[in-house]
Structure formats: C-alpha cells, structure tokens
Amino acid sequence: MLKAGVHTGSLVNHIYSTYKTKLPKVGDGATILHWTDRSACTVIAVEGNIIKVQRDIATRIDKLGMSELQTYKCTPDLNGSITTWKLLKDKKGNEYWNLYEINTNTGRLNKIKGGGGLAIGIRDEYHDYSF
C-alpha cells in the first residue's frame, strides 16, 4: 500500500493501492501508480508472485485540455516498456506489488525503493498537469 504524502501525492493513487491484491493472469489490466500520475498497462507474464507489465498506448479522447477530468482509450502496445513487479507483504500482512529491475549480468531481481505502486484489475491513465 502506498502511504499518502509519503509514497504518493494523490488520494486516488493511495486508494487504488489499497485494493485487495489478487494474482493476475496474462491480459489483465494494470495501473502503475506514480506520485500523482497513473500509467495504464497490460500484464504480459506471470510466474508465481512475479509479474511483468507492459505500458499501453493511452490516447486521450476528451477535449478538456489541461484539466482534472481526463478520459483515455487504452490499448496494448507490443513495443511498450516492460517493468517487473513482485508481490510482497508488509509487517501488518498487507500485500503490495514492488517494482524490481533485472540485473542483466546475473539475472537476479533487485528491489527498487520508491518505485511507485501497482494496481491489478484497473487500467487507468492520468496526467497531473500541475507538475
């Protein structure tokens, strides 16, 4: 879970990060939760508690300009960037997805601190124009 004001500056991202975590299947929607932005993705690989998600193409379809109200059409992008996430538990037993990078020399996973969060089953895009 992302702590509001510590890991995220967005109430919506904090709420998304509190959703009950489920193990996804390939093709499920996912959302990377940044400080205030959100990036729509698709789950492309599942191996136990480790998954890979690929960035979607997010095309804005509203005509509201630089506003809070944003509507996007999201479609899988076979050339989108890929990130690796591992399901972990905090001290209270709450499950959360943590971002990892793969060491190209050893093939080992290295945990990335402050890498945002991941919500499974939600495919959402949002850009905060105030930054």
Image: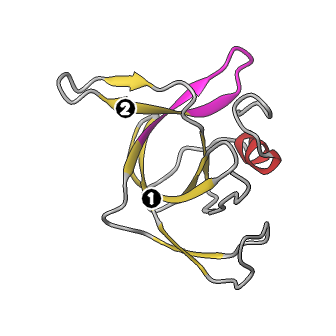
Q: Amino acid at mark 2?
A: Glu
Q: Is 18 on the left-hand or right-hand side of 25?
A: right
Q: Which residues are magenta?
A: 84-97
Q: Quadrant of residue 130?
A: bottom right
Q: Is 69 on the left-hand or right-hand side of 37?
A: right
Q: Where, quadrant-wise, is the N terminus in this rendering?
A: top right
Q: Position of residue 55 (x, y in %)?
A: 44, 58
Q: Position of residue 122 (x, y in %)?
A: 64, 59
Q: Is 115 on the left-hand or right-hand side of 111?
A: right
Task: Kindly tell me whether residue 2 is visible in this rendering.
Answer: yes
Q: Nearer the viewer, residue 118 or 126?
A: 126
Kind of element beneath mark 1: strand
Q: Position of residue 48 (x, y in %)?
A: 42, 36
Q: Which residue is mark 2?
A: 101
Labels 1 and 2: the sequence-earlier one: 1
Dominant secondary-structure state across the stretch colored magenta = strand
Q: CA distance from mark 1 to mark 2?
A: 16 Å
Is the Cβ of the residue at disc 1 closer than 8 Å to that at disc 2?
no
| Farthest-out residue, front | 131
Q: What number of labels is visible?
A: 2
Q: Nearer the viewer, residue 80 or 127?
A: 127
**Residue found 52% across the figure and 50% down from its top:** 24
Task: Examine the structure image and report whether residue 98 is included in the region drawn in magenta.
Answer: no
Kind of element beneath mark 2: strand
Q: Position of residue 113 (x, y in %)?
A: 53, 24
**Residue found 37% across the figure and 32% down from its top:** 101
Dot 1, how many residues are within 10 Å of its Cα: few (below 14), some (14-19), or many (20+)? many
Above or below residue 54? Residue 9 is above
Q: Which residue is mark 1?
A: 55
**Residue found 62% across the figure and 63% down from its top:** 125
Q: Amino acid at mark 1?
A: Arg
